[in-house]
Amino acid sequence: MCEAVEEDLYAVLGASPSDSVQQLRHRYQQLALQYHPDRLGGGSSSEAESGVKKFLEADAAWRILSDQSTRRQYDLQRRARELKQDWPVDSTVYLEDMTWEQDERVYTYSCRCGGGFNISEEEVGEETQRRRQDDEEEETEEEEHSGVVVCCDTCSLSVCVTWSLHGNTQRFEPMTLPSLNTKY
């Protein structure tokens, strides 16, 4: 299992560690234009909140990666984290980015090999409950994330699927719409 995973700042910008500062700046500027609160305007409040969150994440990532010394320090910490992992993890996937398969009651995410990463609703619930109990025992109030390592069903890649312990991980049944042939 992966503990509270720090977000990869390069992934936030959609970049890689080998990118130059100019390439990082370009990615940051694209994200800033896309998610800036002034540009989101009159969208739904959840869309606006999500956009503002992405804007703030991109801004925080840029502040660290734009400076040579803080970027070097971040890269060293990132590498140390990678070396400490119990399991080789290809990347981090957020539960909300996975597809919900209602019939099978699992979250799925496509692997680059064509296979998939699957985690059941039951596994998510059990891990969330276990981590909440651990947090109560430790009496922590800070925002925590839970996560599990999930292997691809076809190749040897694995991802750490993570989600907020304080967020809602329950799925809601889709709303049934009336038939177009129904007469009123």
Image (tube, grey):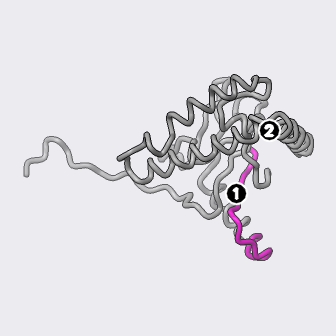
Residue farthest along the left direction in this orientation:
184
In the rendered image, residue 136, in percent from the top left (x then y), is placed at 73, 75
In the rendered image, residue 33, in percent from the top left (x then y), is placed at 51, 34
Q: Foreground residue, 57 or 98? A: 57
| Three-letter code for the amino acid on which mark 2 is drawn | Val
Of the numbered discs 1 and 2, the one sitting upstream in the chain is 2
Q: Foreground residue, 35 or 170? A: 35
Task: Tell me if residue 37 comes above or below residue 72 in the rendering.
Answer: below
In the rendered image, residue 39, in percent from the top left (x then y), is placed at 43, 40
Q: Is residue 69 left or right of residue 183?
A: right
Identify the residue at image location x=68%, y=63%: 143
State the residue position of label 1: 145
Q: Foreground residue, 134 or 153? A: 134
On whether residue 72 falls in the magenta region, the answer is no
Instruction: Give the image quarter of residue 28.
Output: top right
Identify the residue at image location x=59%, y=40%: 108
Label at residue 54: none
| Three-letter code for the amino acid on which mark 1 is drawn | His
State the residue position of label 2: 89
Q: Foreground residue, 80 or 174? A: 80
Q: Which residues are magenta?
A: 134-149
Tell me how far mark 1 sits from mark 2, CA to CA.
Answer: 17 Å
Helix, strand, or loop for circle 1? strand
In the rendered image, residue 31, in percent from the top left (x then y), is placed at 56, 34
